[in-house]
Image (cartoon, rainbow, N blue to C red):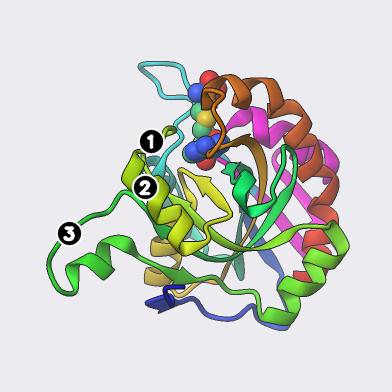
Amino acid sequence: MDRPTFALPPIPPRVHRVLLFVAMRSEADPIARALGATDGTARIGDAHIELLVPGADPVLGVDRLGPVHAASALARALCSAPPDLVVNMGTCGGFESQGLGIADLVVVRDAMFHDARVALDGFDALARAHTRLSPSESQLEAIAARTSARIGLASSGSSLDATADELALFRRTHTLAKDMELAALAVVCREAGVPLAALKGVTDLVDHHEPTHEAFLRNLTRTTDRIAQSAAAFFGQLV
Ligand code: SAH
């Protein structure tokens, strides 16, 4: 398996302020409810959790999902008051060949981009941005034990579908979760020196014949509910 090129700072012993990034409003609502959030903020122990959702595109009216909007929204949010920790929760494509099923959870050890191909020394690793996230191995294991999540690699790209080359890459790297935001958030966190942790829930199976968007829509509520039910246990291990 490829080793991460970059590493994010560890989670500090005391976390007071958390920025919780969720790409879609339909994902954010159940998570906010489960955390008892009012006006986009919640409290867990001593930690103040602030929800960050890029929201609707002013021209198209659809959610501003994907890596560009994720990076831009997070970079803007970090300018005002940097948090002690950024957390990303959301849906992902999972892999049947890795034993994952719909609504299963993945707690992410490392993230990369799978649609970054630059055949130039150095620039390839820069584009791939393979990054070890902040939770320690024991924190990952504690979260996995509490939430029945799998631990592993998440890979991000700008597309909901996957090419044959990308499917081969997922197999080679034992990718567990395919999303459209996490690796971009990891780049912003690295530049800002802010820790990052992520919990993903499977809405669709990338290596299954059913079209991704159909599975996604059918399983969205069930999967976000599962993420929401596990949110408090996830935060409980980190803050
Ligand atoms: N078209 C859908 C929304 C896009 S799904 C709709 O009609 O509402 C893509 C979102 O879910 C992204 O935020 C991404 O992070 C996540 N996601 C879920 N399954 C995915 C997959 N198989 N590949 C990439 N992203 C996925």
Q: Mark 2 points at which residue?
A: 166
Q: In this view, does 27 lie above or below 124?
A: above
Q: Does the residue labelled 2 lie within 8 Å of ligand 1?
A: no
- Mark 2 or mark 3: which is in front? 2
* Residue in front for this viewpoint, 132 or 76: 132
Q: Is mark 3 within 8 Å of ligand 1?
A: no
Mark 3: amino acid: Val
Q: How crowded is mark 2: few (under 14 residues within 10 Å), some or many (20 or more)?
A: some
Magenta-drawn segment: 21-50
Inspect the magenta stretch and tell me whether residue 25 lies in it: yes
Q: Is residue 116 above or below residue 121?
A: above
Is residue 203 something that shows in the picture? yes
Q: How crowded is mark 3: few (under 14 residues within 10 Å), some or many (20 or more)?
A: few
| For residue 148, side relative to residue 69 (left or right) | right
The Cα atoms of the two marked residues, 2 and 3, are separated by: 14 Å
What residue is drawn where x is 87% and y is 63%? 146
Q: Name the residue under label 1.
A: 159
Residue 216 image point, x, y percent: 61, 27
What residue is drawn where x is 58% and y is 74%? 134
Q: Mark 3 points at which residue?
A: 118
Residue 119 image point, x, y percent: 14, 62
Q: Is mark 1 within 8 Å of ligand 1?
A: yes
Residue 222 image point, x, y percent: 78, 30
| For residue 214, side relative to residue 238 (left or right) | left
